[in-house]
Amino acid sequence: MDTPKSLQRDVEHLYLEYNGWLRNWLRKRLSESADADDLAQDTFVRVMRSRQPLNELRQPLAYLATIANGLLVNRWRRQAVERAYTEALAAQPEAVALSAEDHYLLIETLVEIDALLHGLAPRAREIFLLSQLDGLTYKQIAAHMGLSIDQVQKSMSKAFALCYASQYE
């Protein structure tokens, strides 16, 4: 098992060796150079938190790219949620003024819900959204998707179980 000192030394070596490459790799995928720098930094923070022995890495570039890509996907997903929220807010007939703190908490909650929903199979996610957002009955969902009511009920049970588990774990 690596000691904290050896892990720190290994991360420092990895950083010095590959930080430039990682930042360039991220810049190709992002429009802002500062965003690439931030994500590169977040990647190395994630490496440190993982406590994985780095001296055994056979492909450090692939390891870093995998972590950075996951962070990038999370960032894009969060931006999509923020855009959808902003568009929904703009479509409201009267302006609802939220404090900066309430806005932040709402976005964080939406991001958590989005991550939770991505834990469902695509069909179960669609069924859950049709029920909870569009207000369709199980019978309407079954007709809309060409499923039996029993299949809709099973998917909803899985979705509710996931919601419950995320709330009470």
Image (cartoon, rainbow, N blue to C red):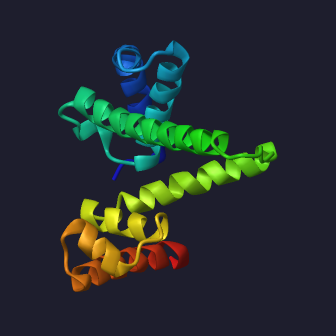
Above or below, 149 relative to 63? below
Q: Is residue 160 left or right of residue 35?
A: left
- Check the image and name the residue furthest to the bottom: 150
> Residue at (65%, 39%) from the top-left corner?
90
Is the residue 135 above or below the residue 53 in the image? below
Vertical order, 27 against 144 (above or below) = above
Report whether residue 72 is seen: yes
Q: Return the residue nearer the eye: 65 or 110.
A: 110
Residue 115, image x and y in percent? 43, 56
Residue occupying image coordinates x 51% and y 44%: 81
Horizontal and vertical percent position of residue 49? 46, 47
Q: Quadrant of residue 158?
A: bottom left
Residue visible at 43% across and 20% down in the picture: 30
Instruction: Give the number of callouts.
Output: 0
Occupied quadrant, residue 60: top left
Residue found 34% across the figure and 15% down from its top:
21
Q: Position of residue 58 (x, y in %)?
A: 17, 34
